[in-house]
Image (spheres, rainbow, N blue to C red):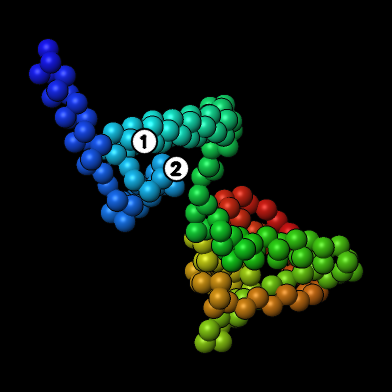
Amino acid sequence: MTTEKTKEAASNDSLSADVVELGRLDERLGFLAKEAGKRLTHSSILEALREQQIGESRKLQNSLRALADKQAMELPHIASLERNRLQKMPTPEETQQFQSAAVLLRQLAASIADWRQQLPNDFQPAIVALLNGGAQIEVESLAQETFHGIRITGTLNGTPCVVLAHQATVQLLCWAQPVEPPERPRRPIGFIIDGLATEA
């Protein structure tokens, strides 16, 4: 019994004698020096480290809990996700619809219809398509073909003809044509836009 007490006392004396100088503390233990004084024992260092780890663990748990609560608050409801679902991306034709032949023909048909109401009864609107090379076609109808294409139906020097052309290569001359029955009766101009046939 006396021997065991002697060994324990000797061990405690060695721990007390075995100290760490402030100059040898790393940065992590620097705060211990400020709180415990100029000399620190192994036991006080270990106890302080355990307390530090416990404190850091609690801080981490609190941070994770706060983050989870914040995400739970910001997470939208499933129903709102359904309402805010991304719309279908538009096709190149939809984004450049203003450049299509349909827009040109639709505007032309509206202009011809308005102009017809303003002309005297013995005049009517007429369209002449001027093509590259100087060809002139008296237009009977205009139809959209593909995104930029136009199908021109009419007469060339009195002969019926059909021409397919890019809208950028065609010039359309609108003029007031005298109505002279029966050689030149009153007639509308046909338009086919997006598959729908109309007259102006």
Q: Residue at x 51, y 72 (%)?
A: 166
Do we see residue 142 in this rendering? no
Q: CA distance from mark 2 to mark 1?
A: 10 Å
Residue 74 placement: quadrant: top right
Residue farthest toward the top in the current orientation of the protein: 1
Residue 14 placement: quadrant: top left
- Image height check: is 98 above or below 158? above
Q: Depth check: 158 or 195 in front? A: 195
Amino acid type, residue under disc 2 in the picture = Glu
Question: Left of 117 or right of it: where is 138?
Answer: left
What crowding class fits label 1: few (fewer than 14 Cα within 10 Å), some (14-19), or many (20 or more)? some
- Say the numbered circle drawn on residue 165: none
Residue highlighted by disc 2: 35
Q: Residue at x 44, y 47 (%)?
A: 34
Q: Quadrant of the N terminus?
A: top left
Question: Left of 121 or right of it: where is 65?
Answer: left
Cβ atoms at labels 2 and 1 below 8 Å apart: yes
Amino acid type, residue under disc 1 in the picture = Ala
Q: Position of residue 195 (x, y in %)?
A: 57, 51
Q: Nearer the viewer, mark 2 or mark 1?
A: 2
- Say the numbered circle drawn on residue 48: 1
Do we see residue 86 in this rendering? yes
